[in-house]
Image (spheres, rainbow, N blue to C red):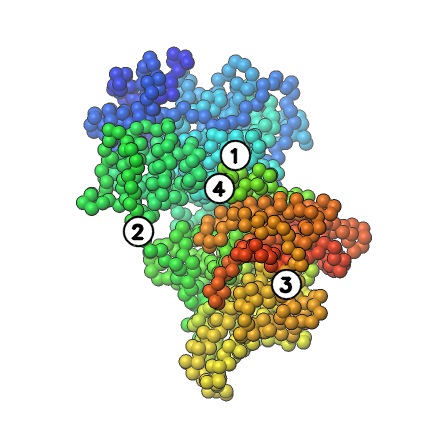
Amino acid sequence: MADNEVQQDSRFLVKGAGDVFGLQPAVISLRGRTVTLSPLDPVGPAPLGLAPVSPSEGWSIATVARSAPFAMEGVNRWELAHELHRTLGAQGGATGLVVEPDLRQNMPIWRKPEEAPALAPPIVEAWHLGSDFSQLQNARTAVPDAAQRRVIVAHLDTGYDPAHALAPHNIQKALERNFEDEDPNLRNSAVEPAHAGALVRNFGHGTGTLGILAGGMVPTVHSPNPGHGVALGGAPSVTVVPIRVANFVAQFWSSSIAAGLNHARRIGAHVVTMSLGGLPSSAWADAVNACYEAGIVVVAAAGNNFSGLPVRDMVWPARFRRVIGVCGIMKNQKPYVDLGGKMEGNFGPPSAMDTAMAAYTPEIPWAMIGTGNQVDQDGAGTSSATPQVAAAAALWIAQNFDDWMRLGEGWQRVEAVRAALYGSAHPGARTFLGRGVLQAAAALDVGLAQADQLRMEERDTASFAFLRALTGFGAAADPRDAMYRTEATQVATHSAALRQLMPDPDATGTADIRKFAETLLDAEEMSKDLRQWLWGLAGRRFVQGGGPSPGPGTPAVAPAVAAPAQPPAAAPALHVTPARDIPSVRRVRVFATDPAQALELERFDLATATIAIPWDETIQPGPIGEYVEVVDVDPSSGRFYRPVDLSDGNIMAQDGLAPSLDDPRFHQQMTYSVAMRVVDRFERALGRRVLWQAEYEYWRNPLETPSPQSAASSETPPEVANKAKLEDLTSVEREGIERGFVRRLRIYPHAIRGRNAYYSPQKVALLFGYFRGLRPMPENTQPQVGDMVFTCLSFDVIAHETTHAVLDGINRRLREATNPDVLAFHEALADIVALFERFSLMDLLRREITKAKGRLGATRLGELAREFGQAMGYGRALRDAINQDPKKFNYITATEAHDRGAVLVAAVFDAFIHIYERRIGPLTALLPLPQGSRPIHPTAVEMLANEARKAAEHVLTICLRAIDYMPPVDIRFSDFLRALITADMEVEPDDVHGYRVAFIEAFRRRYIFADNIKATSVDSLRWRAPDEQIEGFSSIIRSLDLRWDRSADRLDVYASSRLAASKLHDWINKLDPEKARILGVERAKGEKFEVSSVRTIQRVTPAGRIHRDVILMITQRRTIPNAEGDGNILFRSGSTIIVSADDASRAPIRYIVRKSANSEARQARTRAFLARVDDGRDLYFHESDRSGDREPFAMLHAHG
């Protein structure tokens, strides 16, 4: 080490020393060595009139002069920081004194191998700017150069090469700063010094990232001549201020980053971009908070790793919630992860992804330092993605500059930019892409949010949230606690054991402090002070979800922990107070009928209802819960609406906001509540947790759909498939198998200005429209525009679309239209759920029964989306087929998806009516239903309403359970009938009320018959067990590590299902082809197959017995000639296998429901159907490039 080079443990960051010494350099002694304190960034003139950093809030650098490093004495650098804190504290006068090591950090970056410069500039492809990627080319074209120049972007990096042809042309050299080099003559220059040697030692990280941000013209394939081509920079005309904070291999001091951020604030920057990061620092947190409150948008790289080393989680400052963290997505639209030893991008933990998004990398054009004009295609890492997001932020600010600057608070300016970027981002796998993929042009279409719609992010600190909750805040808090928390967070960041224990520390409750303390105390690299602090914390009592609970006679705020001479031999017992009672439900108000009925005198008092939905302890404003995230942005107006907070005490006290047509927050409440009610209905019926459609989500292009060739089987490397349990997987294997999990369904209450509402499989989201309806007018008169209709306020529409999403999560093949029944079934089940959910609204049910005098068929409960249909010009409800004559409107006569679906709805409702009438038979014998004008007795109304509710709940539950007993592909209504019968017989062997007969009769009345049944009966319609069991099948089923508990984490449920599918695929693949054929798998010619899903069923019979089954879904595909014989079509086959998990030793396979690959009749039907539809166009919706195919439900719902 050179004499003038400062060593790692000889520098410290000190906050509050200015209270003692002022801002002038000061000298004190530490262990007999001289310590010089100097301001972190000496304050010069503030160019834009901004106030300089005051001594009381400023940071200083403490530099220790010595001949031998402290590390050689066995002293931990944090121990020195604590000792320096005590030394400075003894000086007196300091308040809030904090000391931390000034770490020399580096961010993993890709280093280009040594090579000689080329003689001519290479031809590169600036693909990342295109409309299919970041959209920066279109965005920058839309913003004039003059507008771009008004925006100042501070670029914190290794410096830059001013002689390179791609250097931005609007660099403010007078504002440059250098916080890396000690030479005072270089203080005002951010130029990266030239180094002897090859390019590998002179990487030019800053030159490369600056080119991506605002670089000039780069030759391309289409314009190969120098000076021509396309501008590389995403925002080539913005004003750039380079700030050198790292050396040529991206090593930096923590103090340099903090100083750079402070300088950006002093010069009045609007955006900061930094493709660097590392361990957290309190100085960074203060600088970020100051930037945020000054209105500066900070964009930082999530970090890079090589097979998980040094860390896979996002680094700081990208992990701060007031910063936009940038992850990576590749050119093939896969997340920039799991690259087999190559550099890849960091992501997570889940809570950090709330403020992260993704941009494109690698293979980005990269300006090569010291070459004059050389550009290669080797820009990689999240370093290359970060300037793209910063450029998009700058362009949005430039377009909205004057109005943006008029926002009253600085933080509002930051949140306005983030709202535009997040709201316009293309959603993808949130685990890896956060809020979505950058869409710069789409962001420009998002207008400036109103100030009252913006929410201030909490202040960032350099420690995990639950550690802050342990020690509390306030004037009485010991400032040393902040140091302990920061050190603990730094140590925990590199602890693999702790990452496994607490995958998301910021989402961890204080009840886990004992586990945290015990695990962290195993770390070797820790100060004695921190060890003593952790022992002290372990001796306190903690309340679930709260801070420390002092024992009797102790003060409200625990004093600083005294340092014992030696750590105790064993951890003291941790006494956890009983957890508080958590409610099981949350009560909220909704529109029970369509809002127009609130203006009908006869019904206005029943227009609203209070419903109970599952309690979610984690709910956040939005609402954002475990299953659902409401995102209220109106793309047509560019407005973002303030999110409702259902946990607000005032809102909870009144059972949610009052129903309102005008309050967007109620719209959010309504969509969330009804959606969660549907989710709960499915979970109770199926006995497992609901998962959203996520298969292949982790790799497919979020903007397009995959090709047939890219749809891989569920084959998994043997080393993973052979693992018995999730706990046996390594962290890399676990992350690989969890890939694709979608935590939340997004709901956009005001997504469409038009007559539609639909579920989007591409976005895994519900999109609701609004439009001007038609006024009720006399017949034969010209329609007139009426009131605004919000589809998000229709109980039926919300329930309908949520059902589409849940059903798609169960089996995505149910939207592959291979016969007329497939999409009709999707529509019908969605209507069935919406219809029968109404029977749980007792006030509405009583009123309808009173009006109909007990005869439910005469009520309007059977109508769906009534207001929506009338507003579009239809006098009757959009899907009302219940009262139509089955001889005229039936399975044979109805061919359109809605019509055929309505036939199925009518059949189920008909069965319900007969079940209801049979149930109330004994009641009506005692209390006959009145005739003529005589009213029905109130007691009879109550009894009939209870019977109607029970019958409706039973019918709906049977319909939902039947989903698990249907074939995986090419479903028909007759399959649904057999699944209904089988599912009900499994739970209720004795059909006392004749449910099964009622279903069969109702289906036959509408000409829905089962195929290949010699004589129709209840028993003959039940699916059959195989004639032969397969040896060893019970053992493989018992070995599956499945999650049966409905309280299990949904990510564990998803991961265990994928692991089980991999194990079963591996096992079946080794079977003799004849044995495999029993399971519906054709392997005689080595055909591939897919174990699409492994699901659990857990049900309680009326006798109190628990049934536990495992559902396997296996699919295959082949090509067959089309009807014309001039091409091929895809033909799918497969089977659903129901296996007992309770008595697997005796006939474990209960049912196999097949769609044979060799059925010539089915092949002929498929050919004929595809030939009729759209001139034979392939309707495999996930495999076509047509927009309607990517969004089948949008097309289905476009006309109702």
The residue indicated by pointer 1 is 345
Question: Between tags 3 and 1, which lies in front?
Answer: 3
The amino acid marked with disc number 4 is Glu
- The residue positioned 46% from the left and 79% from the top of the image is 850
Which amino acid type is marked by label 1? Gly
Q: Give whichever of discs 2 and 3 has the lower sequence position.
A: 2
Q: Which amino acid, by three-letter code, is at mark 3?
A: Trp
Whether residue 364 is visible to the viewer of this picture, yes or no, is: yes
Relative side of 519 to 1070, left or right: left
- Look at the image and tell me in which quarter the C terminus lies: bottom right
Query: Mark 2 or 3, which is nearer the eye?
Result: 3
Between circles 2 and 4, the one closer to the viewer is 4
Q: Residue at x 24, y 27 (%)?
A: 86
Q: Residues within 10 Å of mark 3 (few under 14, many from 20)?
A: some
Is 519 situated above or below 44? Answer: below
Mark positioned earlier in the residue sequence (4 or 3): 4
Pick the front one: 469 or 881: 469
Q: Classify mark 2: helix, strand or loop.
A: loop
Asked whether, in this view, residue 413 is left or right of residue 687, the answer is left
Q: Nearer the viewer, residue 347 or 569?
A: 569
Question: The residue tagged with tag 3: helix, strand or loop?
Answer: loop
Separation (CA) of disc 1 from disc 4: 25 Å
Quarter of the image where the N terminus is located: top left
* Mark 2–mark 1 distance (CA, rounded to whole Å): 42 Å
Residue at the disc numbered 3: 1023
Determine which residue is flagged by label 2. 578
Residue of label 4: 727
SS category of the residue bearing label 1: strand
